[in-house]
Image: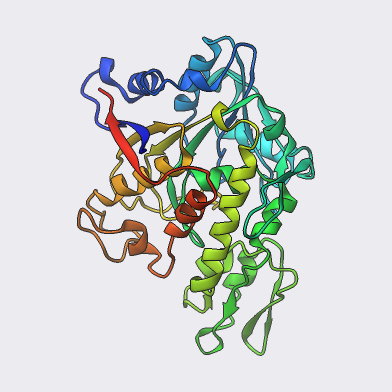
Amino acid sequence: MPSKVFFVERRARSSRDSLTVRLGRLFNKASLKEAVCKDDLVAVKLHFGERGLTSFLHPVFVRVVVEKLKALGVKPFLTDTNTLYREARHNAVDHVETALLHGFSYATAGAPVIIADGLRGHGSTDVPVHGKHFQHVKIADGILQADSMIVLTHVKGHIVTALGGAIKNLSMGCSSRAGKHMMHAAIKPQVITKKCHGDKYCMHHCPVQCIQIFDKTARINAEECIGCGECIVACPHDAVKFDWSNDAVLLQEKMAEFALGAVKGKEKRCAYINFLLDITPHCDCHSWSDSFIVPDVGILASFDPVAIDQASIDLINAQTGLTGSLLKKNFSPGEDKFAGVFGEVDYTAQLRHAAQIGLGNRDYELIKVR
């Protein structure tokens, strides 16, 4: 049976029809209140954005969701987990400061910020999933201890997985730093020697300093590499590559199993809102925002993370691609936009595996909300 996915389009024609007003209607029409019970501690899972980024989810939208939740008599808190790489969200102190700098204060968003895996990213619990790759996954304690969860996702591209949607928000976003390493461990970039200029772009952008230059050629220390993909983005000569056919699929399947662990025990107490706005080619973990690859589409809501990601992809692909962006091909409506940016990556691997392990359903019914 297809899962229900509710949708409001981006266009607004009056103050009574603003996107924030329709987000409230979407919350009601999708019956997201069914995910929570009175006095619940509700994790509002989102991404606060890396410093330098401008395309993260706007706090105004978060405030609408928080107010809806408070009206139901629950106690929402805004949350994310610390990063594996050493930037401005590597520990809870810097992470909270970044959230505040980006406008996620109590005054603006209406809820406190709590970093789910603790001060240094070590606060997690092993959750059994009995998957293809993992028997247990490490999920942040703040996620596990919450009574229910509303997952707010800014849908965008990703250098390794091509798609960054609700599944990635649940997996990378709800795991501890050790869990993130479990997912990335087998993802190792390789330097194409004949293309390398030895100009140190990759070295300067590596968050763990595992790249050195020898004989005017970059060398990556595989034991120290965390598989973040920053070197691939940084290299202007296209001299760093993943084994896309194997590494990207493996990472996505691992992500799906972590996502399953993140909702373990509260499968019916989680709801999802995907924002198809400011759709950039790269993840919100980057410290910059590239041009959008398609026009804004709208907002989706569902109780099924797989269905909402599949619907998001279909709606994005239905758009006309924007010239002057990182999109290289597939500009026409109906053509695959993320394949037009990351042609070698099969992002459907995360959807397929997530459906196979019971996280959700790729079949959906799209219901438009006026």
Quadrant occupied by the N terminus: top left
| Residue drawn at 75 percent across, 72 percent down | 223
Is 303 rendered above or below residue 107? below
Q: Indicate the position of residue 327 as horizontal and vertical percent values.
A: 32, 61
Residue 39 shows in this picture: yes
Q: Horizontally, is 9 left or right of 281 in the view? A: left
> For the image shown, how many numbered marks are present on the structure?
0
Q: Horizontally, is 256 left or right of 90 in the view? A: left
| Residue drawn at 72 percent across, 29 percent down | 145
Could you say which quadrant of the image residue 254 lies in? bottom right
Q: Indicate the position of residue 244 as horizontal and vertical percent values.
A: 50, 71
Q: Nearer the viewer, residue 257 or 313?
A: 257
Q: Indicate the position of residue 96 as horizontal and vertical percent values.
A: 68, 34
Is 15 rendered above or below residue 341? above
Q: Nearer the viewer, residue 228 or 317?
A: 317
Residue 115 shows in this picture: no
Could you say which quadrant of the image residue 299 lies in? top left
Quadrant occupied by the C terminus: top left
| Residue drawn at 56 percent across, 87 percent down | 193
Colour mode of the rendering: rainbow
Is 340 rendered above or below residue 77? below
| Residue drawn at 56 percent across, 69 percent down | 247
Q: Indicate the position of residue 65 as horizontal and vertical percent values.
A: 48, 22
Q: Horizontally, is 269 left or right of 28 in the view? A: right
